[in-house]
Image (tube, rainbow, N blue to C red):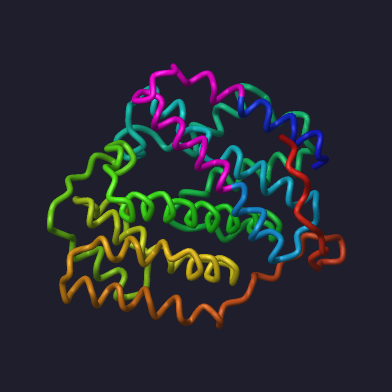
Amino acid sequence: MHNDQLIRLKTWFAEYTRSFLTNEATIDAPFVLKIDHTARVCENLCLLGKSIHLTDGQMRVAEAIGLFHDLGRFEQYRRYRTFNDRQSTNHASLGIDVLNETAVLDSLPADEKAMIIEAIRFHNAPALPGNKPPASMVFMRLIRDADKLDIWKIFADFYRHHRRIEPAIVQHLPDLPVWEEKIVNAIIEKRMAKFQDMKSLNDFKLLQLSWIFDLNFAETFTQAKKRGDLFAIARSLPDNPILNRAIAVISERLKEASAYFPISIGLTESGGLDKGTCFEKGI
């Protein structure tokens, strides 16, 4: 992907998302949150991509994925007033529908378009498919890690500053002093918890903590430790021996991060990873 192509995609995204805004702060808040989230996910992708030496062209593909990964959230919220996929529709699929209907990706090479679509399709899936080409798999892993880093930041900032969370963001879950045993057990067993098991805000916090078992790159662990968002989320949970045990498992996972290394993939003709620098921001 060339830089002028990425600039065009950024311009289209800005115009598309602006069409959802009404200049009413309360109404626009969920849309603005997603616009800001998108920008930070793109920054995370650049950071992670540099850590595994993606070329400039590959980095642009990664940023295009970040740009569009939550595209479906805008139409989802306008239609259903929720970001809960289970109560509305899969936002990844909805975003792909928008991309196909608007043909915004049609000027890209077929392989790049396919990788962007596939990464969006699986960015929120419970698990990745095992039958995709190595190049596609690395972009899928990159967006999942970059997305998690910023979702952790969003929620950690709410808890750090004791701000009221937009109900749609927490899927209208009640803020009660309870938690689901299934979700706690998932963490203790070192696996991701399931969305369908959530019944309270504490469950949502625990589920987010469990995402640490689905990270793919050494730099993601480094950033998670450096930013401290996981600890801010953990501190917002009730002080309880059961929860403290789960939090200890999360903490230990972060300490083990030095044992993780970037995934080796064949993105170049020679089968290795070309070195490159983060490209200039288009707009």
Q: From the viewer's perspective, is residue 26 above or below residue 223?
A: above
Magenta region: 15-41
- Answer with the quarter of the image where residue 218 lies: bottom right
21, 82: nearer the viewer:
21
Which residue corresponds to the image point at 60% horizontal and 57% vertical from the top-left? 142
- Answer with the quarter of the image where residue 8 lies: top right
Q: How many marks?
A: 0
Which residue corresponds to the image point at 31% horizontal and 54% vertical from the top-left? 159
Q: Residue furthest left?
A: 177
Residue 35 at what x, y percent from top left? 52, 35
Is residue 222 part of the magenta span, yes or no?
no
Residue 92 at what x, y percent from top left? 49, 39
26, 213: nearer the viewer:
26
Residue 78 at what x, y percent from top left? 39, 23
Which residue corresponds to the image point at 30% horizontal and 38% vertical from the top-left? 166
| Quadrant of the image containing the N terminus | top right
Q: Residue furthest front?
A: 161
Q: From the viewer's perspective, is residue 253 above or below residue 96?
A: below
Is residue 23 part of the magenta span, yes or no?
yes
Instruction: Give the prevailing secondary structure in the magenta stretch.
Output: helix
| Quadrant of the image containing the C terminus | top right
Which residue corresponds to the image point at 73% horizontal and 42% vertical from the top-left? 281
200 left or right of 45? left
Residue 109 at what x, y percent from top left? 79, 38
83 left or right of 47? left
